[in-house]
Amino acid sequence: MAAAAGPGEGEGMAGARAFVALLAAALLLAQAVLGSEEHQRLLGAPVDVAENDEGLQRALQFAMAQYNRASNDMYSSRVVRIISAQRQLVSGIKYTMKVEIARTTCTKATADPQSCSLYDTPEMAKHTTCNFVVYTIPWLNEIKLLKSSCK
């Protein structure tokens, strides 16, 4: 046999339901406001990376070393500016970079082209736009250049 609700017990249950409904409405409102200010990012989706990001700098340095090694030019090239850079978390980290590079006054025998000055004359500077994709697994100390194309 069911016991009858005592005085005030039904009101407590109605108050709790109202509180839960109000809380749910507040959460939906917060989600709508935050969602309009900032996109919801998918896990593993490419994200923009700041130029001073340490991982990006390592990936770019590796890509440029590979570029200079493969180039038939007797002079080293170096990055003039980063046009765009993204990082994507996969089974490691994939960096996709679009950069402007130019020929330096240093030959390839020079250890660090970053310290070399660029040619002043356009015909010697050879400004080029390159797209690099570098895949790295930092915890295994592995790095690979997946794509290198320059125009």
Image: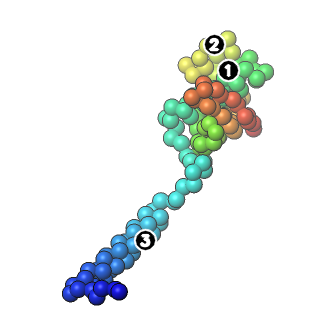
Image marks 3 and 2: residues in contact by CB distance under 8 Å: no
> Residue 4's quadrant in the figure?
bottom left
- The label number, if any, that marks residue 110 in the structure image: 2
Residue at numbered disc 1: 76
Would residue 50 be found to the left or right of residue 30 on screen? right
| Separation (CA) of disc 3 from disc 2 | 60 Å
Considering depth in this image, is 12 or 39 the residue closer to the camera?
12
> Residue 125's quadrant in the figure?
top right
As displayed, is residue 17 above or below residue 65?
A: below
Residue at numbered disc 3: 28
Which label's residue is closer to the chain start, 1 or 3?
3
Q: Is residue 36 visible?
A: yes
Colouring rule applied to residues: rainbow
SS for dot 3: helix
| Separation (CA) of disc 1 from disc 2 | 8 Å
Spot occupied by residue 134 in the image (x, y as percentages of width and height): 66, 34
> Residue 56's quadrant in the figure?
top right
Q: Amino acid at mark 1?
A: Ser
* Label 1 environment density (alpha carbons within 10 Å; few <14, some 14–19, many ≥20): many
Considering depth in this image, is 20 or 122 the residue closer to the camera?
20
